[in-house]
Amino acid sequence: MSKEQNKQIQQKFGEAVNSGKLENLRDLVADDVKEHDPAPNQGPGAQGYIDFFTMMRNAFPDMKVEVEQLVADEDNVAFAYTLTGTHKGDFMGVAGTGKSIKARGMQISRFKDGKLVERWGSSDELGILKQIGVNPV
């Protein structure tokens, strides 16, 4: 695949997340995707991403992921992003607070035959928890 094709697939993934049209992820994620950094309780394949982002959109209904920097090659797309939203529903056991959050993250996605086949990532979950009022011990 070309760099441009990989970037287009990654962009479609982001559009599905930002719009809440999460069923579109089924066309973008391989059934046997290898997830190196799954979210807590994230299941396998496209359904695992759909379930995770459903939880995130329930917790932060106005959630938006904005890519700040992106690089790509014939197999991979790496990007830094900022996640914003308003905490209106349960997030990691914390009921909605109405507080706004802003967190950074990075991700590397590997693509094959037009689908995400492997992913590494890190996001500032602790920062999100602090912003919604959790005081870690």
Image: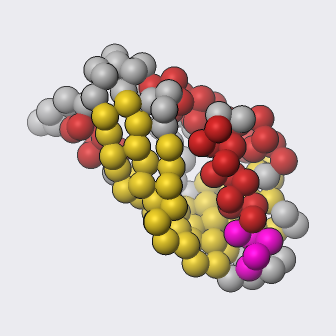
The main secondary structure of the magenta stretch is: helix
25 in magenta? no
Residue 135 occupies quadrant: top left
- In percent of the image, x 70 and y 69: which residue is there? 7
In the rendered view, does 119 fall on the left or right side of 111? left
In the rendered view, does 126 fall on the left or right side of 44? left
The quadrant of the rendering that contains the C terminus is: top left
| Residue 80 percent across, percent down from the top left | 46, 65
- In percent of the image, x 48 and y 32: which residue is there? 62
| Residue 61 percent across, percent down from the top left | 50, 27
For residue 136, say whether it is visible.
yes
In the image, which residues are magenta?
3-7
Q: Relative to the observer, which residue lies in front, 20 or 108?
A: 20
Residue 3 in the image: above or below residue 126: below
- In percent of the image, x 67 and y 74: which residue is there? 76
Residue 133 occupies quadrant: top left
| Residue 97 percent across, percent down from the top left | 28, 20
For residue 122, say whether it is visible.
no
